[in-house]
C-alpha cells in the first residue's frame, strides 16, 4: 500500500490486537466506517461487521469515541445489533453539537436490500445515551439513508435510495420447494428454488441475483423543516438502463442550489442531478465524466466555497453494456479532487492511497476547518483507517 506522504493515517479497527472473535470462525471483515465530530474535541466512528458479508444476517454496528480530537480512542463496542436481522448504520447526521441522528437499516439474508426496514436513533449527549431506534417519522420505511446536509435555509436534506420491484419474479428465491405456488390471476410467476440445506453463501448469491434482475434502485431525498420531527420524501430519480442507483451524496452550491452525485452498479461513471428549490424537485439523472467503479463517494464543502470529492476515480471508458462482464475496476486509488467553481472543473486531483491488490472503500468524514484538514474514515474490507488530509494538498 502506498500512502501519500502529506497525509496522516492510523488503523482504528481492529488494531494491533486483531479481531476479538478471530478464533470463533466468524469471518473477519468490515464495511463502511463513518466518522463525525459530534462536539468540540469529541469524535465518533462507526462501522459494520459480523456475519460473512453484507447485507446478511449477523451484520451489526460497532463504535469508538475520542474525546481528544482523535489522539486516543475508546475500545470498540457494539452500538446497534438486531436479534435476528442484519443491520447497517449508514449515516450519523449531526445538525448541532452533541445531537446525533443515527440512521440504520435492517434486512434479511436472501433479499439483498430490497426488503429493508429503516430506523433512526437519536442521541442528545454526544453518543453517550440513545433513544430508539424508531421509525423515521413521515411514513418512510424502506429507504437506504445516506449522508445529509443542513442547507443554508436551515432545511435538512438527506439523500436516500430505495428498491422498486419491476420484474417477473415477484417472490424471492426459496430454499426447497415454496410452501405454496404463487399466483397472479391465472399466471404463475417464476420462482427460483434452491436445494434444501443450501448454505448462507448460496442463499446470498441467489438472492442478490434475483434482486438485481427484478428491481431498479431509485434516488430521492428526505427533507425536514422542523429539526427532524417529521420528514417528507421528495425526488423520484431513475433510469431505464442502467437502473441500479444508490448511495447518493449531496452538497450545497454557491447559489443555494443542491448538487447530487450517485454511484451506479454497472455503468462505470458517477451520475448527477440538481435541485434549485431546496430539494423539492430534481433534474433528471445525467451521466458525469467522473469515472467510478460502483463505489461510494464523499462530498464536503468548505466555508470558502471549495468542494472536496473523495472517491475512486478508476478509469472506465466502457458505457453501459449488458454483455460486458468487466463493468468496473478495482476501488484503487482512493483520491481527492477539489473544485473552486461548484464542480464545473477540478483544480486539484491527488491520490491519497494506492493499492492494486485491495479495494479502498467508502470514505466518510467531515471538514476540520480550524485545523485545515479533511478527516475521514475508510476501509479495505478488513480494517478501518482514520485519515487526515491538508485542505490545501496539491
Image (cartoon, rainbow, N blue to C red):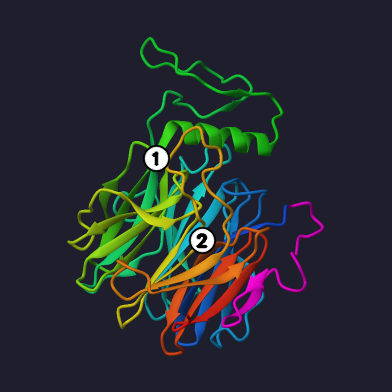
The reply, left or right, for residue 283 in relation to residue 64 is left
Q: Position of residue 157 (x, y in %)?
A: 29, 63
- How many numbered callouts? 2
Q: Quadrant of residue 134?
A: bottom left
Image check: 52 left or right of 140? right
Q: Which residue is mark 1?
A: 242
Residue 125 in view, yes or no = no
Over which residues does the magenta segment extend? 1-26
Foreground: 328 or 78? 328
Counting from the top left corner in percent of width and height, residue 238 is at 32, 43
Number of residues whose C-alpha sits closer than 10 Å to that of mark 2, classed few (under 14), some (14–19) or many (20 or more): many
Q: Residue at image x 64%, y 77%?
A: 10
Quadrant, the N terminus: bottom right
Check residue 230 in the rendering and tell me which mark sits there, or answer none.
none
When the figure is inspected, residue 156 is found, relative to residue 134, above or below; the finding is below
Give the structural element (helix, strand or loop) at label 2.
loop
Separation of residues labelled 2 and 1 (CA atoms): 20 Å
Pointer 1 local density, CA inside 10 Å: few below 14, some 14–19, many at least 20? some
x then y, percent, for residue 275:
22, 59
The residue that appears at 58% across and 26% down in the rendered structure is 174
Overall secondary structure of the magenta section = loop
Residue 17 counted in the magenta span: yes
Sooner in the amino-acid sequence: mark 2 or mark 1: 1
Q: Is residue 111 magenta?
A: no
Q: In front: 369, or 267? A: 267
> 304 above or below 139?
below
Q: Which residue position holds label 2?
A: 312
- Horizontal and vertical percent position of residue 331: 57, 57
Q: Residue at x 67, y 57 (%)?
A: 29
Q: Is residue 54 visible?
A: yes
Q: Of all residues shown, which one is farthest toward the front?
A: 317
Amino acid at each position: 500500500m502506498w500512502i501519500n506522504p502529506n497525509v496522516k493515517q492510523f488503523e482504528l479497527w481492529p488494531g494491533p490486537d486483531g479481531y476479538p472473535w478471530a478464533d470463533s470462525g466468524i469471518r473477519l471483515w468490515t464495511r463502511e466506517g463513518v466518522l463525525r465530530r459530534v462536539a468540540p474535541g469529541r469524535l465518533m466512528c462507526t462501522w459494520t461487521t459480523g456475519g460473512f458479508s453484507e447485507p446478511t444476517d449477523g451484520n451489526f454496528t460497532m463504535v469508538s469515541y475520542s474525546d481528544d480530537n482523535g489522539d486516543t480512542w475508546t475500545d470498540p463496542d457494539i452500538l446497534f445489533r438486531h436479534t435476528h436481522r442484519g443491520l447497517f448504520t449508514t449515516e450519523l447526521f449531526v445538525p448541532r453539537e452533541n445531537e446525533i441522528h443515527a440512521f440504520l437499516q435492517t434486512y434479511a439474508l436472501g433479499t439483498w436490500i430490497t426488503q429493508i426496514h429503516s430506523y433512526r436513533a437519536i442521541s442528545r449527549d454526544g453518543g453517550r445515551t440513545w433513544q430508539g431506534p424508531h421509525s423515521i417519522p413521515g411514513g418512510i420505511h424502506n429507504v437506504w439513508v445516506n449522508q445529509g446536509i443542513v442547507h443554508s435555509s436551515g432545511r435538512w436534506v438527506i439523500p436516500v435510495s430505495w428498491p422498486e420491484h419491476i420484474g417477473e419474479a415477484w417472490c424471492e428465491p426459496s430454499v426447497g420447494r415454496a410452501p405454496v405456488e404463487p399466483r397472479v390471476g391465472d399466471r404463475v410467476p417464476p420462482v427460483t428454488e434452491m436445494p434444501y440445506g443450501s448454505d448462507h453463501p448460496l442463499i446470498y448469491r441467489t438472492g442478490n441475483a434475483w434482486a438485481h434482475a427484478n428491481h431498479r434502485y431509485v434516488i430521492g431525498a428526505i427533507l425536514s423543516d422542523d429539526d427532524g420531527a417529521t420528514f417528507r420524501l421528495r425526488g423520484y430519480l431513475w433510469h431505464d438502463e442502467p437502473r441500479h442507483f444508490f448511495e447518493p451524496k449531496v452538497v450545497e452550491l454557491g447559489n443555494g442550489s443542491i448538487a447530487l452525485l450517485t454511484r451506479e452498479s454497472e455503468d462505470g461513471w458517477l451520475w448527477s442531478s440538481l435541485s434549485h428549490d431546496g430539494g423539492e424537485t430534481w433534474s433528471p439523472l445525467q451521466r458525469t465524466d467522473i469515472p467510478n467503479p460502483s463505489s461510494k463517494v464523499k462530498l464536503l464543502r468548505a466555508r470558502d466555497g471549495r468542494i472536496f470529492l473523495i472517491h475512486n476515480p478508476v478509469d472506465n471508458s466502457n458505457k453501459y453494456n449488458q454483455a460486458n462482464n468487466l463493468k468496473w475496476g478495482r476501488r484503487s486509488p482512493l483520491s481527492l479532487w477539489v473544485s473552486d467553481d461548484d464542480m464545473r472543473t477540478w483544480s486539484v486531483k491527488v491520490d491519497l492511497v494506492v493499492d492494486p491488490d485491495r479495494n479502498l472503500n467508502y470514505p466518510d468524514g467531515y471538514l476540520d476547518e480550524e485545523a485545515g484538514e479533511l478527516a475521514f474514515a475508510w476501509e479495505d474490507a478488513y480494517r478501518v483507517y482514520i485519515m487526515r488530509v491538508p485542505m490545501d494538498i496539491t
